């Protein structure tokens, strides 16, 4: 039985590129990303929400921000995001993740297809009393 890694993926970019990426992510969900069953609903909801947004011309903006929370087996989907960043260079990808049982967490940020920031280390859980 796998340990589950909590992930939040933030995608920043224009509407059509973001939609294309989310569709690519949906197609890779079971083969490459290895998500749990709730992740498909998260991706569908993000795609539907983006499709319902007004067009860039109607809103006079060209930047959209989409957050998707997914749960993956054992590890964050680093290789998938790395490949996607090189394919969708116009988008910014921010992947935040934590796997509490194996005690690691961190983030990766890609811009223009390149890794620009990363931090990976032990989980930091503060007591709240």
Image: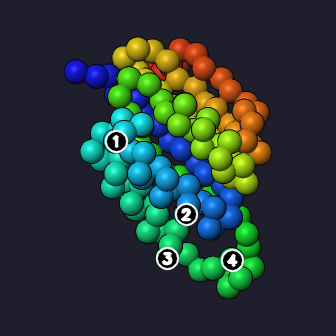
Per the image, the residue denoted by label 2 is: 19
Q: Quadrant of residue 5?
A: top left
How far is the residue under mark 3 from the one under mark 2? 11 Å
At mark 1, the secondary structure is helix
How far is the residue under mark 4 from the one under mark 3? 12 Å
Q: Quadrant of residue 36?
A: top left
Identify the residue at horizontal 61%, vertical 30% (top origin). 107
Q: Camera-side residue: 81 or 6?
A: 81
Per the image, the residue denoted by label 1 is: 30
Image quarter hosting the N terminus: top left
Mark 1 or mark 3, earlier in chain: 1
How far is the residue under mark 4 from the one under mark 1? 32 Å
Say above or below: 94 vs 14: above
Query: Can you give x and y, in whole percent of width and height, for residue 48 in the image?
Result: 43, 68
Per the image, the residue denoted by label 4 is: 56
At mark 2, the secondary structure is helix
Observer able to see residue 32:
yes
Per the image, the residue denoted by label 3 is: 52
Mark 1 or mark 2, earlier in chain: 2
Of labels 2 and 4, the one closer to you:
2
Q: Camera-side residue: 79 or 69?
A: 79
Mark 3 or mark 2, earlier in chain: 2
Observer able to see residue 126:
no
Identify the residue at horizontal 52%, vertical 68% (top origin). 50
The answer to the question of whether label 1 and label 3 lie on touching residues, with beta carbons closer than 8 A, is: no
The answer to the question of whether label 2 and label 4 lie on touching residues, with beta carbons closer than 8 A, is: no
Q: Residues within 10 Å of mark 3 (few under 14, many from 20)?
A: few
């Amino acid at each position: 039985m796998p340990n589950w890694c909590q992930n939040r993926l933030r995608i920043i970019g224009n509407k059509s590129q973001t939609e294309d990426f989310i569709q690519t992510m949906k197609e890779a969900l079971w083969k490459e990303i290895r998500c749990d069953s709730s992740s498909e609903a998260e991706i569908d909801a993000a795609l539907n929400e983006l499709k319902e947004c007004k067009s860039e011309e109607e809103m006079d903006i060209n930047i959209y921000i989409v957050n998707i929370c997914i749960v993956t087996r054992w590890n964050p989907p680093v290789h998938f995001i790395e490949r996607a960043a090189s394919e969708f260079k116009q988008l910014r990808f921010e992947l935040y993740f934590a796997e509490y049982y194996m005690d690691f967490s961190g983030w990766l940020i890609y811009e223009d297809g390149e890794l620009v920031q990363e931090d990976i280390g032990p989980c930091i859980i503060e007591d709240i009393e």
